[in-house]
């Protein structure tokens, strides 16, 4: 067997072992090395690793002998699903940077480099008409300016968010709390097919894993991990969406919340987030403004490097002039020289950028980004 295939098979076997997540795997890997060495370790050796008791050690030994990895690979091939390990170059960069990235990511569809510019939009399952309207409006707007929309494909706000992106022919990624061969909720099967054609449906769980309430909190860390930030649209005080917001804070991501009617139970969670410091969101502009420092390595869907994500809401001429600026004052003659645009065009465009609050004019006709 090819060494790469063997290594992947061993890791899939580990991933299919009950009780092992990325943190436990790291501890085992630090002690024994690659997945194959972990599977070959003895019971006493395994139990010498902090956090590994007799039950988990036995699970590992059982997995070494009884987990049908070949069936998993055959099923993946039949369903057109890729099995991507954490060490692969195809593994999403955003997700790889969190504390506990999934060992394995099952992907139906494609995750591409430009998906580094992703925003999660999540919320209540039992949402209101107001919530659905806001989720679709924001998802469409974010999609139109180049964001990939990430959500959990649950009923309610999640499904609306995915559909909002699809309506603009934008990209969207769904993260499931079940295996990819157990689509949940079942009425979203057609939606999952549409998402896989315009993005990806992903899970860290073995393909035949049924949905379970215990799967969703870990699933939410993947939603956060794939994204630059998380937008919460409607959430009760006890809501899975608030768990996603918590993961985002732990990951150092931005948390945004859409305010709602004060007398709605579905506004309680979002209003609490706002009181605790989440950015209040009325439009996509609020999100773009907040993400300025995160823009260094972002790319648009067309592959053009973006110096600042605020430039995504500007036309080509505005973006060119905006990109020539920095946080240090630059004279109008320097801007003309840098952009090679006529002086009249630069002057009028700078006025427009001032109106859009993208730049600020200082004394002596010098300009800086706001």
Image (spheres, rainbow, N blue to C red):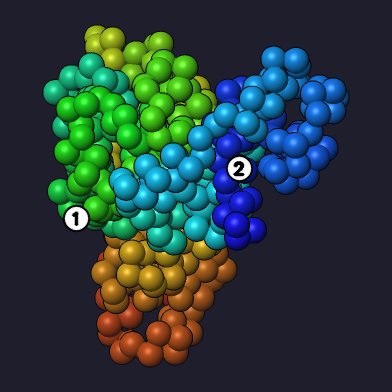
Q: Is residue 275 above or below residue 170?
A: above
Give the structural element (helix, strand or loop) at label 2: helix
Q: Nearer the viewer, mark 2 or mark 1?
A: 2
1 with respect to 297 (left or right): right
Pick whichever of labels 2 and 1 is earlier in the sequence: 2
Q: Residue at x 37, y 50 (%)?
A: 77
Q: Position of residue 59 (x, y in %)?
A: 65, 22
Query: Mark 2 sits on what residue?
Result: 11
Q: Quadrant of residue 242?
A: top left
- The crowding category of the residue bearing disc 1, from other C-alpha atoms within 10 Å (few below 14, some 14 to 19, many at least 20), is few
Give the structural element (helix, strand or loop) at label 1: loop
Depth order, front residue of 283/177 = 177
Q: Position of residue 18 (x, y in %)?
A: 58, 23
Q: Position of residue 75 (x, y in %)?
A: 37, 42
Query: Mark 1 sits on what residue?
Result: 169
CA gap, disc 2 to disc 1?
A: 35 Å
Depth order, front residue of 124/65 = 65
The total number of labels drawn is: 2
The answer to whether residue 149 shows anywhere in this view is no
Depth order, front residue of 129/108 = 108
For the N terminus, the image quarter is bottom right
Q: Residue at x 44, y 61 (%)?
A: 113
262 with respect to 57 (left or right): left
Q: Residue at x 27, y 48 (%)?
A: 196
The answer to whether residue 59 shows anywhere in this view is yes
Depth order, front residue of 49/201 = 49
Q: Residue at x 28, y 74 (%)?
A: 316
Q: Is residue 140 above or below residue 175?
A: below
């Amino acid at each position: 067997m090819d060494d790469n295939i063997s290594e992947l098979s061993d890791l899939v076997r580990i991933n299919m072992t009950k009780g092992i997540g990325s943190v436990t795997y790291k501890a085992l890997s630090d002690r024994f090395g690659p997945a194959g060495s972990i599977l070959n370790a003895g019971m006493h050796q395994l139990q010498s690793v902090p956090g590994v008791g007799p039950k988990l050690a036995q699970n590992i030994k059982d997995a070494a002998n009884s987990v049908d990895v070949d069936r998993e690979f055959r099923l993946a091939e039949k369903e057109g699903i890729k099995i991507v390990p954490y060490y692969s170059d195809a593994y999403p960069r955003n997700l790889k940077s969190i504390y506990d990235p999934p060992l394995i990511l099952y992907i139906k569809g494609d995750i591409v480099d430009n998906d580094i510019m992703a925003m999660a939009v999540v919320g209540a399952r039992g949402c209101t008409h107001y919530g659905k309207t806001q989720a679709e409006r924001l998802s469409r707007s974010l999609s139109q300016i180049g964001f990939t929309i990430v959500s959990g494909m649950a009923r309610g706000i999640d499904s609306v968010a995915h559909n909002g992106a699809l309506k603009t022919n934008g990209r969207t990624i769904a993260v499931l709390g079940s295996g990819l061969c157990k689509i949940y909720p079942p009425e979203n099967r057609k939606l999952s097919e549409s998402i896989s054609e315009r993005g990806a449906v992903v899970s860290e769980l073995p393909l035949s894993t049924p949905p379970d309430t215990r799967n969703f909190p870990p699933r939410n860390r993947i939603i956060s991990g794939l994204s630059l930030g998380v937008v919460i649209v409607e959430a009760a005080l006890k809501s899975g969406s608030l768990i996603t917001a918590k993961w985002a804070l732990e990951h150092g991501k931005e948390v945004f919340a859409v305010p709602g009617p004060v007398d709605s139970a579905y506004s309680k969670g979002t209003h609490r987030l706002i009181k605790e410091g989440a950015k209040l969101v009325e439009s996509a502009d609020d999100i773009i403004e907040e993400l300025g420092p995160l823009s260094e390595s972002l790319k648009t869907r067309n592959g053009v490097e973006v110096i600042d994500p605020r430039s995504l809401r500007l036309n080509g001429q505005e973006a060119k002039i905006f990109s020539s600026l920095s946080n240090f004052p630059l004279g109008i003659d320097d801007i003309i020289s840098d952009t090679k645009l006529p002086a009249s065009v630069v002057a009028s465009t700078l006025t427009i950028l001032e109106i859009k609050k993208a730049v600020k004019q200082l004394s002596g006709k010098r300009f800086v980004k706001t």
